[in-house]
Amino acid sequence: MLTVVNKTKKGESYILSSNIDKPFSFLYLTMFYIACNSMTNTNFQKPVPVIKWAGGKRQLIPQITKMMPEEFNKYYEPFFGGGALFCELTPVSATINDFNKQLVGMYKQIKADPDGVCAALFDLQRQYNEKETMEEKDALYYEFRKSFNDYLANDVDIKYSLPAALLIFLNKAGFNGLYRVNASGMYNVPSAHRKNIKAYDGDNIIAMSKALKKTKIMCGDFAKACKNAEAGDFVFFDSPYYDTFDTYQASGFSEADHIRLFELFKTLSDKGVYCMMTNNDCDFIKNLYRDFNIKVVDVKRMINCDGKNRVGKEVIVTNYDVKE
């Protein structure tokens, strides 16, 4: 039986890399604040995911929250991605992790300098939307993509506002809103050919920054991300789908990784840690977790380019009983 204490109820033109360390001019920031007026909003706002990520769980939030433990201590999410559940819960004490260091760098920058990210993203959007023809818009998209790939090619961590804003913009302006890299690790998502892009949402970025203030943000292996989890804590494993989506990250997520995740799931269970894991509905996963509670749910996979394959099923696995 799990013992729970200290309970938490569920509930500026920037294309060249040489510009990344230049501060925004006072005039530009003044114009930005007057135009947007988002930073003056001091009311609490629950954030929504800043970007779209493969396997995101936003549509399953109602079901997931119903299946969560009523009370828990610290929150851990080793495969953060878009962080839909984190946004819904805005936990007081949390550790989040992802293997994609550009994604992690974006969250760190949003946490540290939301104003800078907002200003850079606002200007990227302005530049794109002010172009008169689709050819001009597409050309600018690929300039932005090249700039982002310059960071990837030089293995530069996202420690500035511009690359963080570029990631968000490309996610909104790219085809199907996905993050995909080629064998060389370069971002290769084509333009979605949209007439106008609404990538900027200052209020939401500020809300996400506030939610991240007391959150530990890690980048690395999923096992290290929750090594400090103790009895009464809650770990949400939104793991990469089995035998799918491997190409979204150059390194992929192998069958051996899935087995290693299962062993971690068992170890945490033995410690009295609440664990929940989601994955695609397949025999491998269901057989692996056959000794735990498994629920099959219907999903829409909006990131799939083939509309016929956008309907599917997933499993939600828990190591504790769920009240129906």
Image (tube, rainbow, N blue to C red):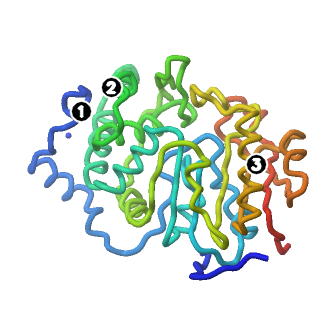
Q: Position of residue 27 (x, y in %)?
A: 9, 49
Q: Position of residue 278 (x, y in %)?
A: 73, 51
Residue visible at 63% across and 26% down?
Answer: 247
Query: To which quarter of the image does residue 164 belong?
Result: top left
Relative to 255, say whether 82 is above or below. Answer: below
Mark closest to the chain's N terminus, 2 or 3: 2
Q: Which residue is mark 1?
A: 14
Mark closest to the chain's N terminus, 1 or 2: 1
Residue visible at 90% across and 40% down?
Answer: 283
Badge 3 marks a residue whose secondary structure is helix
* 176 left or right, relative to 261: left
Q: Which residue is mark 2?
A: 147
Which label lies toward us, 2 or 3? 3
Query: To which quarter of the image does residue 68 belong?
Result: bottom right
* 32 left or right, relative to 316: left
Badge 2 marks a residue whose secondary structure is helix
Q: How many C-alpha atoms fall within 10 Å of the one at disc 1: few (<14), some, or many (≥20)?
A: some
Q: Position of residue 54 (x, y in %)?
A: 62, 40
The reply to whether dot 2 and dot 3 touch (C-beta < 8 Å) is: no
Number of the label disc, if any, that sits on residue 263: 3
Q: Amino acid at mark 2?
A: Ser
Q: Is residue 141 visible?
A: no
Residue visible at 38% across and 60% down?
Answer: 209
Badge 1 marks a residue whose secondary structure is loop
Q: Nearer the viewer, residue 300 or 99?
A: 99
Q: Quadrant of the N terminus?
A: bottom right
Which label lies toward us, 3 or 1? 3
